[in-house]
Amino acid sequence: MRPVRSIGEASASPVRSRDSIRQLTTTAMLGAFYGLPWLHWNGKPWLLFDIDARQFQFAGVSMQPERSLPLLWLALAALALLALVTSLYGRLWCTYACPQTVLTRLFRKLTALTTFNGRLTPLGPPLRHALWAGIALWTGISFVGYFTPIADLVNGMLTLSLSGWEWFWISFYGLATWANVVYLHEQVCSYLCPYSRVQGLISDTRTPAIQYNAPRGEPRGPRPADNASVLHRSRGLLDATTAADYVFRAAHPAIAGAMPKFSAAHLGDCVDCGACVAACPIGLDIRNGRSSSCIECGNCMDACDDAMAANHYPLDLIRRARPANDGDVARSGIHIKPLAFAGIALLCIALAAFTAASLAGAA
């Protein structure tokens, strides 16, 4: 039996709308974080937490802490809306916009640039770490720039006139950014992120998640290069029970024993190339089922789409979808969690409007 074609042999790459969205959100998040401290309105910083003066500046307006209650309600409304989107569509925040994800993606782009087209050279690692140290330092400066006017901060650094605390916080956040992304990266998402820890409360059995289409993919294995997809063969899709049995056998060979040998006509669409596992930053095999450690970065989907395209198979063997029994769940009644989060968001927005009107009346 001939091996499957490599990814590089694909006649055309699949359309990567996910890549476009990632690039757009990465650019937007980085631009917002690094750019906001420099923006001014009416001669005042657009956003500044002035701890010394005990005031908060937003859009050129200075507010005392007691007059910023509407913004607190709006922040709570934003959290409720994030929970609403997560409940309805899955962890899109983690996939596209989380600062940890964005910085890790930026570091990997930097790594790709400093490998010089895949060639390992002695210059690569020192150059990569030097560039990332510069980005981490600027991250620390930008973060402190939300509490001290950033122009004064930069001038103080150049003249060595900053206070000890300013030097400390710039160094602390710069070092934390450098070490976090270089050594921890997605481990933060899996084990330390509070948003990740509350996924069980936000999501439910109707929430879409990245998952493997086992009835289409199983049994997995190499096949002749001209073997068609099961969607174009008489075999069709397996029933869910049989597919789950093959998944268990592949995931636990010590318990279930070796997988039997299948003819090319009985194989599913998974070519068992291992690209999805290699692409996962924390080494999960999404084919073995959903895991609470999965941060839904989407790398496995991209890798699998490449493998499917290389073999001229339809894409989305690994995709973001609702559970297979979603039809049964949908008939069970009203989807409570999204309604609750939408209600909380509307309530917080109403309270923000009410407190803003009350403060305006008192003034």
Image (cartoon, helix red, strand yellow):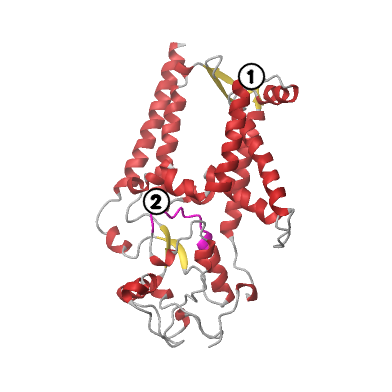
Residue at the spot of label 2: 88
Residue type at mark 1: give it: Ser
| Label 1 Cα crowd, 10 Å radius (few <14 / some 14-19 / many 20+) | few
User: Where are the magenta residues, as a range?
Assistant: 291-301
User: Taking the image as drawn, is residue 229 in sight?
Assistant: yes
Q: Secondary structure at mark 1?
A: loop
Q: Position of residue 165 (x, y in %)?
A: 59, 22
Residue at the image position 41 percent from the left and 69 percent from the top: 213
Residue at the image position 59 percent from the left and 67 percent from the top: 14
Q: Quadrant of residue 305?
A: bottom right
Q: Looking at the picture, does residue 108 appear above or below residue 75?
A: below
Residue type at mark 2: give it: Leu
Residue at the image position 37 percent from the left and 72 percent from the top: 247
> Is residue 110 rendered to the left or right of residue 169?
right
Q: Quadrant of residue 164?
A: top right
Residue at the spot of label 1: 163
Q: Position of residue 77 (x, y in %)?
A: 42, 34
Query: Between marks 1 and 2, how big is the CA–CA gap?
Result: 47 Å
Residue furthest to the front in view is: 122
Between 128 and 322, the residue placed more toward the observer is: 128
Between 197 and 123, the residue placed more toward the observer is: 123
Q: Quadrant of residue 149?
A: top right
Pick whichever of labels 1 and 2 is earlier in the sequence: 2
Q: Is residue 293 magenta?
A: yes
Residue at the image position 44 percent from the left and 79 percent from the top: 268
Q: Is residue 259 magenta?
A: no
Q: Looking at the picture, does residue 217 appear above or below residue 102?
A: below
